[in-house]
């Protein structure tokens, strides 16, 4: 398995990537993203499955937990067996208007061999510990922006295919229904006191904005225009640029992230962070 990733099939795949992360103690976090070419309307129902081989043709795939709707992440709270030959593999089943789709199986160690994975886990563990101790370390949530899916039925201009209302309560200016996925918890940021100013898209109501730099872990799926929410203050930031500063065999672990505070008048503050998120991970 080492260094041997399954090839992506040419046309039928709807999943862009499936990633496995163990940064939260005692739990595997499996995240996935869809290819931009996949445009089935919501609702999209995902079911995480576990099996012992890297083959979709195996008959031992079993569901883990309950299906999730319109999310891009699921948790596996079970401690899976570490075998020398039978690795835990995950895959994601998607049921949508066009039928059932499966992702390529991903090893329970993500894309890392065991030794590299242990190294990666230790790097992340030490960073999170440092964030918690340091004054600058902040706990937060990630709102992952939608780039695919059902187009906004309220504000989309059908000639330009662009959203026309940055304060739209249906798409929050993204052009896609719901705007963002269900929030991810335990996303730590160590804020740097150094800031600088940039010009922003005026359609967002912030022409001239202060950019804050932060170091963050768990950045596998962090991307431009995602939103980071400070848990303590509820301040919300747009992510502008993500530069990975620590990797293990190409898997990003730590990143320098540039963000700008979203004006408090923005509709983004209307996105609720469900309270049960606090309990879901038991404080890590
Ligand atoms: Zn809209």
Image (spheres, grey):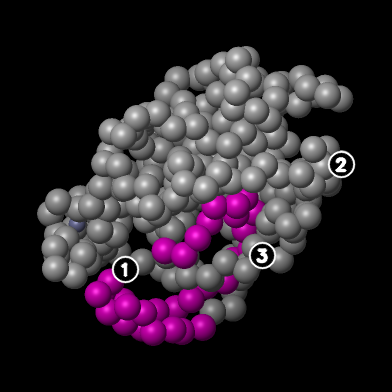
Residue named by callout 2: 115
Is residue 236 visible to us here? yes
Task: Name the quarter showing ligand 1.
Answer: bottom left
Q: Report whether the residue tagged 2 is closer than 8 Å to ligand 1.
A: no
Sequence-wise, which precedes: disc 2 or disc 3?
Answer: 2
Image height check: is 264 above or below 111?
below
Q: CA distance from mark 1 to mark 3?
A: 27 Å
Q: Locate the C terminus and report the quarter of the image it occupies.
A: top right
Q: Residue 261 falls in which quadrant of the image?
A: bottom left
Which mark, residue 263? 1
Other-residue count near label 1 (Cα within 10 Å), few / some / many at <14 / 14–19 / ≥20: some
Q: Is residue 51 left or right of residue 260?
A: right
What x and y, as percent, mark residue 68?
Answer: 41, 28
Q: Which residue is at a point 48% across and 70% down the rendered structure image? A: 240
Q: Secondary structure at mark 3?
A: strand
Q: CA distance from mark 1 to mark 2?
A: 44 Å
Q: In the image, which residues are magenta?
A: 196-225
Q: Which residue is at a point 35% across and 52% down the rendered structure image? A: 148
- Assess whether mark 2 and mark 1 are in contact (beta carbons under 8 angstroms): no
Q: Locate the N terminus and report the quarter of the image it occupies.
A: top right
Number of disc labels: 3
Q: Residue furthest front?
A: 10
Q: Is residue 240 left or right of residue 149?
A: right
Residue named by callout 3: 244
What x and y, as percent, mark residue 186?
Answer: 56, 44
Q: Is residue 108 left or right of residue 43?
A: right
């Amino acid at each position: 398995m080492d260094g041997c990733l399954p090839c992506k099939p040419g046309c039928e795949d709807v999943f862009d990537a499936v990633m496995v992360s163990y940064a939260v103690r005692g739990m595997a976090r499996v995240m996935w993203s869809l290819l931009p070419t996949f445009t089935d309307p919501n609702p999209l129902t995902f079911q995480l499955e576990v099996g012992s081989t890297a083959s979709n043709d195996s008959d031992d795939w079993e569901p883990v937990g309950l299906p999730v709707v319109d999310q891009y992440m699921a948790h596996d709270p079970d401690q899976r067996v570490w075998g020398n030959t039978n690795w835990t593999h995950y895959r994601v089943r998607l049921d949508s208007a066009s039928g059932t789709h499966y992702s390529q199986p991903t090893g329970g160690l993500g894309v890392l061999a065991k030794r590299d994975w242990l190294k990666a886990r230790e790097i992340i563990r030490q960073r999170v510990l440092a964030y918690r101790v340091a004054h600058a370390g902040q706990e937060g949530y990630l709102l992952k922006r939608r780039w695919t899916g059902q187009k906004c039925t309220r504000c989309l201009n059908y000639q330009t295919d662009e959203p026309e209302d940055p304060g739209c309560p249906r798409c929050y200016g993204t052009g896609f229904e719901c705007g963002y996925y269900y929030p991810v918890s335990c996303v730590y940021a160590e804020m740097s006191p150094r800031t600088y100013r940039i010009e922003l898209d005026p359609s967002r109501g912030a022409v001239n904005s202060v950019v804050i730099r932060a170091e963050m872990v768990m950045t596998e799926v962090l991307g431009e225009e995602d939103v980071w929410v400070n848990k303590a203050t509820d301040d919300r930031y747009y992510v502008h640029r993500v530069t990975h500063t620590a990797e293990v065999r190409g898997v990003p672990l730590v990143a320098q992230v540039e963000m700008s505070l979203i004006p408090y008048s923005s509709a983004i503050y209307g996105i609720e962070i469900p309270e049960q998120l606090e309990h879901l991970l038991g404080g890590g």
